[in-house]
Image (cartoon, grey):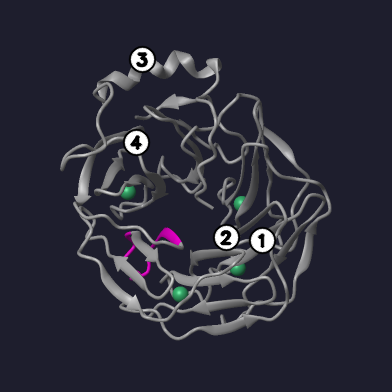
Amino acid sequence: MFKRPSLKSLLPALGVSAILVGAFLAPAAASSGTGGCDLTGSTFVADFSGDGKADMAQVTSAHTCVAVSTGTAFGNSTVWQSLAFYGTKATLAGDVTGTGKADLVAVNAGNTFVMTSTGAAFGAPSAWSSTPFYGTQGTFLADVNGDKMADLVAVNAGATFVMLSNGTSFGPPQLWSSTPFYGTVATLMGDMNGDGKADLVAVNAGATFVMTANAGGTAFNPPTVWSSTAFYGSKATLVGDASGDGKADLVAVNAGATFVMTANAGGTAFNAPTAWSNTAFYGSNGTFLGNVAGNPTRDLVAVNASAVFVMVSSGTAFGAPQGWF
Ligand SMILES: [Ca+2]
Ligand SMILES: [Ca+2]
Ligand SMILES: [Ca+2]
Ligand SMILES: [Ca+2]
């Protein structure tokens, strides 16, 4: 989900915004040192400060930095924890404590650690599980039972398991589906039907399937076809509520345009694809969906080596690129 394709930087169409970069970043800033926050490392877009606007975090082997969103830009990136914090199997962001502030989770082969957010810093890492728990097809952090605390989900080739968060630790693994369910193009998670519980999405070359979390939040329902249209992006395929109706949508980022399939009103299938932007827009260090502007819609964020751009969603389209960092 947070893969960092090795892509070239943003296309020339965005060059006009590049002049904003110098205001925030010293040229050739080093990644080492206690205060050397820059755009190196893995990027996460989530609301770490808890004000309703998604922020940007950078996890490096030296420290974790956060640049808080003002709603129209990301502020200075500052050290929130001066420790190395990442998992050998996965590093994930989500609100595991239910405080409204996103935390960081490191999944190792034999245990899982959490750094909780205070809203202005990350606390010291603490062990939340000493059970080996990760998936061969994907490891995700999402609230599958609707209690506002993000849970760990491990997708294997033949089954999907969940470890529920209780706010201070992850519980024992539970079998949530014994149906093989993952996508040949992408496996993603989001609340597709708007019931407050995260669902699994499998994107294949010619169709997209969804396994919704059941009403009781105890297992995944059987898979259903949500679209038989080929739909994925050459640069990124993302899930998030771009339209702002409470149901997550599927976003395909191509080299020259971005398309969206919104979830239908009933939360039972995807509507037909529509173009939301004809601007080339993707990042060399990752492309993300997050409500950085603070409205109900998720915006598109392109993180490059030395600059970050945002296209704010109107609910039916993405606006022109803006320099945010
Ligand atoms: Ca925030
Ligand atoms: Ca939960
Ligand atoms: Ca759901
Ligand atoms: Ca939506």
Q: Which residue is mark 4?
A: 39
Q: Is residue 23 left or right of residue 158?
A: left
Label 4, label 1: how many angstroms apart (C-alpha)? Answer: 29 Å
The magenta stretch spans residue 175: no
Which image quarter holds the C terminus?
top left
Q: Nearer the viewer, residue 265 or 103?
A: 103
- Residue drawn at x 56%, y 57% is 246
Regarding residue 267, the answer to whether it shows in the image is yes
Instruction: Identify which amino acid the numbered label 1 is placed on.
Output: Val
Instruction: Identify which amino acid the numbered label 2 is placed on.
Output: Gly
Label 1, label 3: how many angstroms apart (C-alpha)? Answer: 39 Å
Q: Nearer the viewer, residue 232 or 50?
A: 232
**Which mark is in front, 3 or 4?**
4
- Residue drawn at x 53%, y 73% is 144
Instruction: Identify which amino acid the numbered label 4 is placed on.
Output: Leu
- Residue drawn at x 29%, y 75% is 127
In the rendered view, tell whether residue 193 sits above or below residue 33. below
Q: Which residue is mark 2?
A: 190
Where is residue 78 drawn, in percent x and y?
21, 42
Magenta segment boundaries in residue numbering:
90-101
Give yes or no for contact between labels 1 and 3 (Cβ–Cβ under 8 Å).
no
Sequence-wise, which precedes: disc 2 or disc 3? 3
